[in-house]
Image (tube, rainbow, N blue to C red):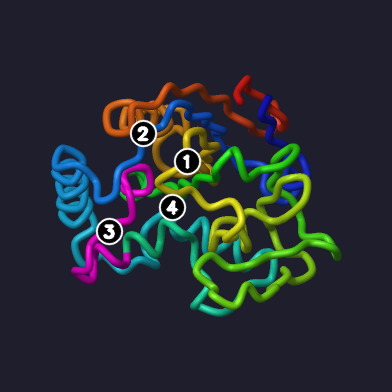
Amino acid sequence: MVSLDISELMTDFPEYRVALVVATGLKIQAPSPPSLEAAVASAEAKVRDAIGETPLAEIDALIAWRSAYKAFGVKKTSYRSSVERLLKSIQQGRGLPRINSLVDAYNAVSALHHMPVGADDLAKVSGPLAFRIARDDDTFIALGDSDNKQDPPKAGEVVYADGQKLLCRRWNWYQDARSAVSGGTANAALTVQSLGTGALVETVTEDLCAWLTDHCGATTAYAVADADSPSVSLGGD
């Protein structure tokens, strides 16, 4: 059973909605196969055409995330939502990063719909999942940090966590190394997040599930947490 709770955020962010997706039986390839590479390239082109040279600060979904970050004390421009970094990379001509078929697929969906999407290896997750306010004993090791240095969150920061550690700092800014997906990941928990702008979370999640099935061989299920149902759960390994 995989559960997710967002109740701590509902007072300050009542429009927050997040889909919890459990993807099982993943077959992850690196590099991605030609069919997925073509789909990602098509997604990049669609995003590039859609946003053109529009300043990122004028895109509704990014405005919402910037406002949310400021609301819990983030003022530095170097801390932006994961989806803003993807759109910036496309707009500046670098395109989406290429990691493996799972990451490449969910990054493409994130960029297409302007919603943050992330994933964690279920074999590396312990206990219930939650988007919540940081606690004094929270631990965080940034993905890619060769020194495995602890970088705990600031007081009042919104974080994503399991029962033992953080999975992501600053809501969806940067992932912890200890739950990252890899080529050996068989089962994963993904999240699709919205602050009330753009497409419905359900629509985007259905698209994500289709990408995961078509390009990663996954079986998927999802549930949406929001103000009416702040805690959801799904069966899974």
| Sequence-first disc among 3 and 4 | 4
The x, y position of residue 115, in whole percent, is: 43, 47
The residue tagged 3 is: 96
Q: CA distance from mark 1 to mark 3?
A: 21 Å
The residue tagged 1 is: 185
On the picture, is 207 further left or further right than 61?
Answer: left
Query: Crowding near pointer 2: few (<14 within 10 Å), some, many (20+)?
Result: some
Q: Amino acid at mark 1?
A: Thr
Q: CA distance from mark 4 to mark 2?
A: 31 Å
The residue tagged 4 is: 61
Q: Amino acid at mark 4?
A: Ala
Q: Nearer the viewer, mark 4 or mark 2?
A: 2
Give the extent of the magenta segment.
88-105
Q: Secondary structure at mark 3?
A: loop
Give me the residue at 44% from left, 43% from top: 184
The residue tagged 2 is: 27
**Magenta run includes residue 94:** yes
